[in-house]
Structure formats: structure tokens, C-alpha cells
Amino acid sequence: MSGNIWSYRDISGFQAGADLTGYTVEATDGSIGKVDKHSDEVDAAHIVVDTGVWIFGKHVLLPAGTITSIDLQEHTIYVDRTKEEIKNAPEFDKDRHHPIEPDYYGKIGQYYNHM
């Protein structure tokens, strides 16, 4: 992955500050859940996805740099990772990781940058 994993790519029609809560998230091989939270924070932009029953109701944090496109009409976000890659990412506990510690950002960044 080139560029900053924690920044949104230049995505046509998307503007920072848009509310992505509730958007469906699609991995390269299928749906992984819906956006529970998102952040446009500089050098820390990300989405938190509620995976529902897919991986037993867990939440996953995806850096904004994994997002390839956003369909504003269909309320769908597409990411450039497979379901398995997302499932194997360092665990995100939305209660424990609030606010998100720098070391957790480091683990996530290292995981997604090495794919």
C-alpha cells in the first residue's frame, strides 16, 4: 500500500466530514458489516465496522487508506482487503480503545501496511 494508511484517498464525490455511520462495508470478497463510527482526524482517519454475526459481533477498525471508493447513493464503502485479512487484524475493543491509544494505531498501521 502506498501513501498514508491513515488518510482518505482521493475519492470522487466524498468530502471529509461526511457522515458515514450506517454505511455498508464491502471487502473485496463480500460484505463485512456496517460503519459504527468514523473519524476524519488528520493522520488517524478510520472507520469502525460492526461486523454483526460475521465474526461474532466484533468491531474492526479500518484505516481510511484501505477505502477504495464510497458509493454515496447506495451508502456503501468498498475496501481493498479480503474478509480474512480484516478478520485477522489486531482485535478492536470499542470500549477499551476509547480514546484510541497511539500504540494501537501503530499495530493496526503495521498490519495493514504489510499486506
Image (cartoon, rainbow, N blue to C red):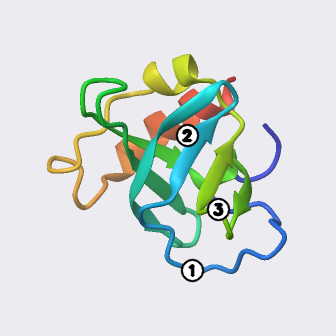
Q: Is residue 35 left or right of residue 15?
A: left
Q: Could you classify mark 1 by the number of other residues whose Cα lies within 10 Å: few (under 14), some (14-19), or many (20 or more)? A: few
Disc 3: CA contacts within 10 A as few (<14), some (14-19) or many (>=20): few
Given contact means CB atoms under 8 Å apart, are the residues at marks 1 and 3 in contact? no
Image location (x, y in percent) of residue 7: 66, 61
Tag shown at residue 74:
3
Instruction: State how far apart marks 2 and 1 are (Cα).
Output: 23 Å
Disc 2 and disc 1 in contact, CB within 8 angstroms: no
Spatial separation of the CA atoms under disc 2 and disc 3: 28 Å
Q: Amino acid at mark 1?
A: Ala
Write down the residue under mark 2: 109
Which residue in the structure is indicated by mark 1? 18
Residue type marked 2: Gly
- Compared with residue 39, is residue 69 higher up or lower down, i.e. above or below? above
First along the sequence among labels 1 and 3: 1
* x then y, percent, for residue 11: 80, 65
